[in-house]
Image (spheres, rainbow, N blue to C red):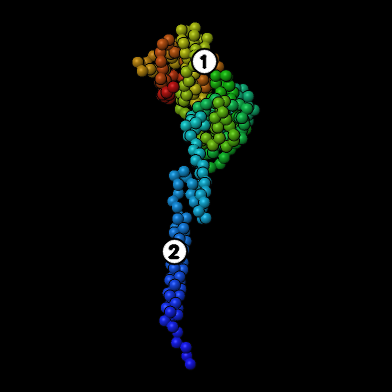
Amino acid sequence: MFEIPSVARVVAVVAALTLLAAACGSDSSSGDSGAAAVTDAGTASTVPASDDGLEPSSDGAEEATPEVEPETTVDSESDSADAQILSAYLAVVDTANPAGFSGLSGCAGEVGDDAMPVVFSVQIDESTLGTDDFSVETASGMRYTPTCATLSPADEADEGYTVLLTGPLGDSADRPVSVSIVGELTGRDGADLSMLEAPPITDGPGPSLVLAIETDAGSECAALGSEVEIQTVWQASVSESDQTAAAISLVSADGEANPVGVDDPDVDNHLVLCVPAGHDTIRVDVEAGAVSGGTGSPNPESSVEL
């Protein structure tokens, strides 16, 4: 026979089942809450970069952002950038008398040699000067290296702006047209002159004025009352005449004046102008025919600012 449970026992069983169901429901809710907590924690680990330049790593820790070095720029307004070749002048072509210019330059020459003064805007460091610093190109594209490169005859302490090139530099049928620096030539001030190119080579009608530098007056100009003098540099050797001073104007903001004297101590491409006392020269104007070149050809009109 089956035994029929009492009412009390049935009530007890129902109560136990109710408590078990409640416990299972509570465990399920706790599991959901735990999952939500993990999700929240994952979201929180992705944080924006802080203001101090640090960025988070993949595991949530902050790392320093690598510093980027600033770019280095080169100042184009340097001595090297300012230095230039002012002139290349073909003074002699296919000489029949090499002793004529070798006596001035000290370079041993041969019949058929050429002579070309090259004027720079800075004084040349003679210890860096060599024939292989220069390359001369002719109209046909041929290139020549001079057999001699010297500061002579314009090699005094206040000169040194002109390099005289001699040797076969072309010929009358294939004349030189350009000069470039291909060696490590430098100026006395350290300016790098490598890779410079000269303006187109000229050969007349006569040497022009290309550079003027004002300095304190030397003894010759000081004796004439000058406080300053102007060293002028021409494309090639020049000689003065009695009319030279009158044909040169020293221009200032207040007007013009002629030099009170011209000092021409030796045969080269320099002339010293004695400036009137109190005159502030800003430009030198030269009339055509003020001086004559080595072959007697007169200079063309020219003008140079100090």
Image position of 10 (left or right of 130) = left
Q: Is residue 262 visible?
A: no
**What is the C-alpha distance between the residues marked 1 and 2?**
106 Å
Q: Residues within 10 Å of mark 1 (few under 14, many from 20)?
A: some
* Rendering coords of residue 152 (x, y %): 59, 23
Q: Give the residue type that dot 2 points to.
A: Ser
* Rendering coords of residue 261 (x, y %): 46, 11
Q: Quadrant of the C terminus?
A: top left
* Rendering coords of residue 186 (x, y %): 57, 30
Viewer-nearest of discs 1 and 2 = 2
**Residue name at image x 48 percent, y 34 percent:** 75
Classify mark 2: helix, strand or loop. Answer: helix
Residue 65 is tagged as: none
Q: Residue furthest left?
A: 254
Can you identify the residue that label 2 sits on? 33
Residue 264 is tagged as: 1
**Quadrant in the picture for residue 282:** top left
**Residue name at image x 44 percent, y 64 percent:** 33
Q: Which residue is at the front of the view, 184 or 89? A: 184
